[in-house]
């Protein structure tokens, strides 16, 4: 029998590849009829790039993604608050990559089909329930749109990597309710334009209640002197403001946010120009869920956004899903496809990710932007007069420790999945 994985997103696909690497059969069941390259840009941090490298995917990533050189925070007036090198430029043994989420998913999916076989990824299989058997469990699937039964599968374990609206989590926690919205809306788009700053810079400008994020995501474009720029325009509304359910595919409307960014032209970056030049944009309420006291129930556990959905602050969602997959594979190799393996996985990953969820609710490393807004809303001449060097460095270093990518610790630790 195989390990059953629910969901063909980043968590599910990386779990399948990791289990294959340690000699454990896995099968993926995806609810949608086809796996489309949805979303926009994301960042994969060095601790997660290390894991993808150890899965043999470094060359595929490097051929497509941008190796991020620096991260810079700016005020709403375009004045530099703080910048720091990233990835290889910061002394890590692995790069940080900026990439389209759909392209990362495609790299993982292609590798799964090559290594495990295309028949190990079943689309159009929406999980509805499972039951325990003498040797493992049996999962039951229906067509999501028609509701008719499409099959069942027997496995030794079930890994639910089916996202923030996880069916499995809903079964385990039927009274939890919908994701928790913090009042912020992200409008996200991709625009082809000119490189800015170093050409490999990720910038964040503004503060907690209005922010603009931008970074390049295509190596191919840079080879032609251009840039494919991922951008995020964010506004935070008052408590009680009503908005629509989050979805990777929900079309955004410029009238809802562009007027508030019309003056955000910094010389080195024209935010309203980028917004207008995009073919389309998507809106996404910033949501998460409260950390759980338990992920594992017998032979079933949660992974990725099904286990620990978090605000997209600090560029950590995809990276933490990749780490989940690697720890799962290590524990299943150590303990076999058993409940003990799932408990060991949870014991390591649940406290770590709960800490990140809570840190992101406190604005993570982006808190420096809010402090500048509170202390100098009309602007500043010298950032040192507003925010001390110690405050800046402690904010950045503290978040790296919480999120598991402190440079010296990462470079010095042994692999999660030993060769």
Image (cartoon, helix red, strand yellow):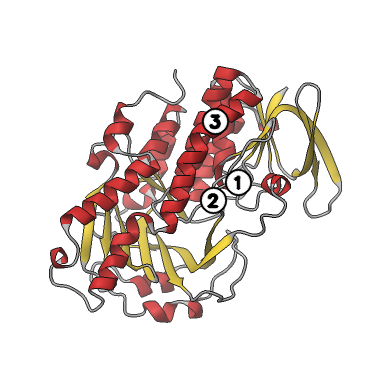
Q: Residue 218 in the image: state x and y as whole percent.
A: 39, 50
| Farthest-out residue, right | 148
C-beta proximity under 8 Å, tags 1 and 2: yes
Q: Which residue is mark 2?
A: 309
Residue 244 vertical position relative to residue 392 in the rendered view, above or below: below
User: Label 3 neighbourhood size at 10 Å, few (<14), some (14-19), many (20+)?
Assistant: many
Looking at the rendered image, the quarter that the N terminus falls into is top right
Residue 392 circle label: none
Q: Residue 180 in the image: state x and y as whole percent.
A: 57, 61
> Image check: 128 left or right of 217?
right
| Farthest-out residue, front | 293
Residue 66 vertical position relative to residue 369 in the rendered view, above or below: above
Q: Examine the image and state in which quarter residue 192 appears.
A: bottom left
Using the image as rendered, state which of residue 69 and residue 131 is in the foreground. 131
Using the image as rendered, state which of residue 233 and residue 358 is in the foreground. 358
Lower position in the chain sequence, tag 1 or tag 3: 1
Query: In this orientation, does residue 238 appear?
Result: yes
Mark 1–mark 3 Cα distance, whole angstroms, equals: 15 Å
Query: In this orientation, does residue 109 appear?
Result: no
User: Label 2 neighbourhood size at 10 Å, few (<14), some (14-19), many (20+)?
Assistant: many
């Amino acid at each position: 029998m195989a390990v059953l994985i629910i969901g063909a997103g980043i968590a599910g696909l990386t779990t399948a590849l990791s289990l294959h690497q340690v000699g454990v059969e896995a099968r993926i069941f995806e609810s949608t009829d086809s796996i489309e390259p949805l979303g926009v840009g994301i960042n994969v941090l060095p601790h997660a790039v290390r894991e993808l490298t150890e899965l043999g995917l470094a060359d595929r990533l490097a051929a497509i993604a941008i190796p991020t050189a620096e991260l810079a925070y700016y005020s709403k007036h375009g004045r530099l608050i703080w910048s720091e090198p990233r990835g290889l430029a910061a002394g890590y043994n692995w790069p940080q990559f900026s990439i389209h989420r759909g392209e990362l998913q495609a790299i993982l999916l292609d590798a799964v089909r090559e290594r495990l076989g295309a028949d190990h990824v079943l689309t159009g299989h929406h999980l509805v329930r499972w039951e325990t058997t003498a040797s493992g469990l049996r999962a039951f699937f229906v067509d999501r749109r028609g509701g008719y039964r499409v099959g069942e599968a027997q496995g030794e374990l079930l890994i639910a990597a089916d996202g923030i609206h996880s069916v499995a989590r809903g079964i385990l926690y039927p009274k939890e309710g919908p994701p928790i919205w913090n009042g912020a809306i992200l409008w996200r788009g991709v625009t082809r334009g000119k490189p800015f700053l170093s050409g490999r810079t990720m910038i964040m400008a503004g503060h907690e209640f209005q922010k603009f994020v931008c970074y390049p995501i295509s190596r191919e474009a840079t080879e032609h002197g251009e840039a494919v720029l991922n951008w995020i325009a964010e506004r935070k509304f008052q408590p009680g403001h009503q908005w629509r359910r989050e979805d990777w595919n929900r079309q955004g409307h410029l009238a809802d946010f562009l007027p508030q960014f019309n003056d955000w032209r910094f010389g080195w970056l024209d935010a309203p120009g980028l917004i207008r030049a995009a073919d389309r944009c998507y809106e996404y309420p910033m949501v998460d869920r409260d950390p759980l006291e338990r992920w594992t129930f017998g032979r079933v556990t949660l992974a990725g956004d099904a286990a620990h959905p978090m605000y997209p602050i600090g560029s950590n969602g995809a990276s933490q899903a990749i780490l989940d997959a690697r720890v799962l594979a290590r524990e299943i190799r150590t303990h076999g496809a058993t409940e003990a393996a799932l408990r060991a996985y949870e014991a390591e990953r649940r406290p770590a990710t709960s800490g990140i969820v809570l840190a992101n609710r406190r604005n993570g490393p982006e808190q420096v932007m809010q402090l500048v807004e509170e202390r100098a809303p009309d602007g500043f001449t010298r950032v040192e007069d507003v925010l001390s060097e110690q405050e800046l460095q402690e904010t950045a270093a503290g978040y790296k420790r919480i999120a598991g990518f402190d440079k010296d610790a990462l470079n010095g630790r042994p692999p999660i999945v030993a060769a």
